[in-house]
Each structure stands twice: as C-alpha cells, then as structure tokens.
C-alpha cells in the first residue's frame, strides 16, 4: 500500500496514540508539576509524531532519517521521564505506554538503521 500522507505511517499512528496516553496519565500529576515534569513529558511525547510527520514531508532521504533520529531521541527522553514519574509515585505502571514505547522505538530504529 502506497502512503499518501504521514498519517498512513503505522509508526506515526502509534506515536500519536502514545501522546494521547501520556496526556491521560499526566492529568493525575501533582499541581506542583504543572510547569515541571508534566510539561516536559508532554513535550517529549508530542515531539515524536511531530518529527515523524516533518521528516516525511522532507524531500531528501537524509533529512527524513535525521528527523526520525530526532523522534527516536525524544522517545528515549520520554521513556526516562516516564520512569522518573513511576519512581516519584506520580503514576502507576502503564502497560499501554510501555508497549507503545517499545513498538515505536523498534519501528523507528528499523527505519533509521535498515538491514543492509
């Protein structure tokens, strides 16, 4: 199937769902984190599908891979912040988020570093 839009990319769809899940869990963060960890984790999450979309719109493969790399780095940032949120007892373990982090990470890695 030919992709007509970045929205057709499964990796983008999963990353977008990850953002929605992150927004759900951050609603429960303490008010003291409104401008701290809550905002930071949301920004990292939003960066993932945004960079996938922007990269898709680029004209050159190298630029696309660069934006996929940025998305991957944001995913690692998000994972770190998710773990911190767990350790601070702001949230409970969330299988949906953990599975999406693994899936999106695996997909992005394979897109950035295809088997040669």
Image: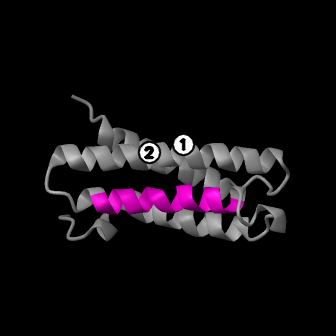
In the rendering, which numbered label is found on residue 72? 2
**Quarter assignment of residue 59:** bottom left
Is residue 39 or residue 53 the one in the foreground? 39
Q: Position of residue 47 (x, y in %)?
A: 46, 58
Taking the spot 20% from the left edge, 43% from the top edge, the residue there is: 62
Q: Position of residue 113 (x, y in %)?
A: 30, 34
Taking the spot 24% from the left edge, 50% from the top edge, the residue there is: 64
Q: Is residue 100 visible?
A: yes
Q: Residue furthest front?
A: 35
Note whether 15 is above or below 28 in the view shown: above
Taking the spot 39% from the left edge, 39% from the top edge, the residue there is: 109
Could you tell me which secondary element the residue under label 2 belongs to? helix
State the residue position of label 1: 76
Where does the magenta region start and end? 38-54
| Distance of label 1 from label 2 (alpha carbons) | 6 Å
In the rendering, which numbered label is found on residue 105? none
**Quarter assignment of residue 92:** bottom right
Can residue 107 be found in the magenta stretch?
no
Taking the spot 77% from the left edge, 61% from the top edge, the residue there is: 33
| Quarter that holds the N terminus | bottom left
Note whether 73 is above or below 43 in the view shown: above
Q: Position of residue 115 (x, y in %)?
A: 26, 31
- Mainly helix, strand or loop, the magenta region? helix
Q: Is residue 102 visible?
A: no
Question: Is 82 positioned to the left or the right of 91 in the image?
Answer: left
Give the total of numbered labels: 2
Q: Residues within 10 Å of mark 2 (few under 14, many from 20)?
A: many
Q: Are marks 1 and 2 in contact (CB under 8 Å)?
A: yes
């Amino acid at each position: 199937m030919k992709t007509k839009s970045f929205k057709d990319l499964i990796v983008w769809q999963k990353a977008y769902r990850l953002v929605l899940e992150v927004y759900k869990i951050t609603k429960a963060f303490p008010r003291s984190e409104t401008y701290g960890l809550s905002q930071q984790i949301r920004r990292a999450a939003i960066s993932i599908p945004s960079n996938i979309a922007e990269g898709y719109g680029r004209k050159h493969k190298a630029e696309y891979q660069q934006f996929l790399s940025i998305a991957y780095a944001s995913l690692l940032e998000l994972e770190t912040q998710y773990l911190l949120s767990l350790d601070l007892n702001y949230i409970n373990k969330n299988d949906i988020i953990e599975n999406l982090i693994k899936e999106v990470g695996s997909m992005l890695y394979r897109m950035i570093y295809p088997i040669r």
